[in-house]
Image (cartoon, rainbow, N blue to C red):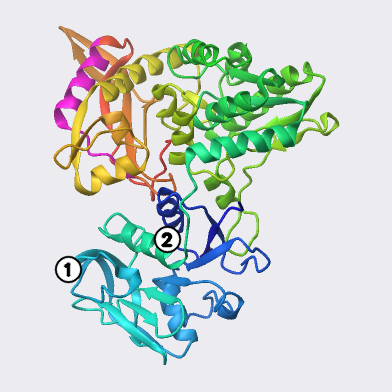
Amino acid sequence: MQQQKIIILDFGSQTTQLIARRLRELDTFCEILPYNRFPADDENVIGVILSGSPYSVYAPEAFRIDLAQFRGRVPVLGICYGAQYMSHSLGGRVEPAGSREYGRANLTEIDTNDPLFHGFQKDSQVWMSHGDTITALPPGFHTIASTDHVVNAAYAADDEPLWGVQFHPEVFHSVQGTLLLRNFVVDICGGRQDWSPANFVEATIQELRSQIGSERVILGLSGGVDSSVCAVLLNRAIGNQLTCIFVDHGMLRKNEFHDVMKDYDGLGLNVVGVDASDKFLGDLQGVTEPEQKRKIIGRDFVEVFNAEARKITDARWLAQGTIYPDRIESLNITGKVIKSHHNVGGLPKEMNLKLCEPLRWLFKDEVRRVGRQLGMPEHLITRHPFPGPGLAVRILGAVTREKVRVLQDADDIYIRALRNYKVRLSGEEARRVLAAGVPADMQNGEIEVSLYDQIWQAGTTLLSDVRSVGVMGDERTYENPVALRAVTSTDAMTADWAHLPYDFMARVSNDIINNVKGVNRVCYDISSKPPSTIEWE
């Protein structure tokens, strides 16, 4: 049975990935493509979704396509700009809204007989985000939903499978948005909902065995979720044909090299652990410029990894834990490469390695679900993202063993506290956490999770070039401050600072200052991305 797919044509919206994530949560396979890259020869396409866009349909730089390439062939759903462009190009009228329509709204009028709105409740909350609005529909179209301020909040064609909504069903603020997408994908497009972790594992194992045969594979492990799940999946498929290389550059979290190696041993993986901390820390001596630090670490990693890889003389494949957002970010909507995620780590061309990326179609939450399907321990699956250069980019200034020790100790107290502190969530926040794949049982509309599971990423930064005065006992101290960071996000493209409880912050600050020699002040970073980044360097 061939894999059905929904094609999402990206017109540049910040929430295009969210559309795909919602469809995957409906066990439906989908693919995001630039707006001008519709696969006309793909017979597995069962529907098309047109995304939002930062542009007005009248803007000279607006992205335009010929709807005829799929109109009449498969059902089409336009979202925000997609709805406005479809209406405009078919003879409707789109005009400035007067004031930007942004934020929560309620559907005061809904045609629940239309298949797109089956099961909807009156006054269902949705999320608007547009400067133009549809003031007149094309001939042969009719309104199926309105708000107090937007008459044509949703529309449908009279005699063909075309729909448009001027709100964003993919965001959590649209309370019944997932229902709308399900109605489109399952009821209208006929989706089988057969995209699941179990099916993915079974199909991918067969694909890997066919692709690799009896040849050997090298995989660089980082200890993170993606590479770990990739390793376990490959191990399930080809067993001892896989050799993993885990390089310790000396700037991992406290005890991380030992703990992760123990985890990998328990998973039955063939892992070569390389302690190269002397080389990395030696080459970083006296270096303070952040980009130079990253380049040195990247160069050293390639050298160490290549030296180990060359020992496996019969290897023919290099495996990577590349996931779907990496591939999406590699192309902009014109199809031009803007950021490479397929660098094979500088391996010499004479090694003639072929690339294997078994997770290339998965989002992060799907990777975690696959990990659970493979029986991996939960603490490996729920690990936060961690920068490749490690703590080197969380030490402002030159990196030394002593600074790494101070930061490891402070960070260990912080991360352990996040794991141990439990919170109860409900409403949109609970739905967001559950959608990210965090295992939790809903009781009376609430879930209980740790602070660690509630947030996307957390870490500690050592301001090693800054010293502040403090008092411990009756003595004056002159030591370094640390800054704690915790953010909520769905894909790290944007992030907001996490509103951690005051009692938690007070306890962590007290524990760090009392137990970490070299730190006498704790700060909390309340900057969002943008304009700030998640890491300080």
Asked whether 449 falls inside the magenta stretch, the response is no
For mark 1, give the secondary structure.
Answer: loop
Q: Which residue is mark 2?
A: 186
Residue at 22 percent of width and 38 percent of height: 442
**Cα–Cα span, label 2 and label 1:** 24 Å
User: Which is the main secondary structure of the residues drawn in magenta?
Assistant: helix
For mark 2, give the secondary structure.
Answer: helix
The answer to which of 298 and 2 lies nearer the viewer is 2
The answer to which of 14 and 226 lies nearer the viewer is 226
| 79 sits left or right of 445 in the view | right
Report the span colored magenta.
496-514
Where 17 falls versus 350 (above or below)? below
Can you give x and y, in whole percent of width and height, for residue 313 in the image? 82, 19
Can you give x and y, in whole percent of width and height, for residue 499 in the image? 22, 39
Q: Are marks 2 and 1 in contact (CB under 8 Å)?
A: no
Q: Tell me if residue 345 can be seen.
A: no
Q: Which residue is mark 1?
A: 123
Tag 1: residue type? Asp
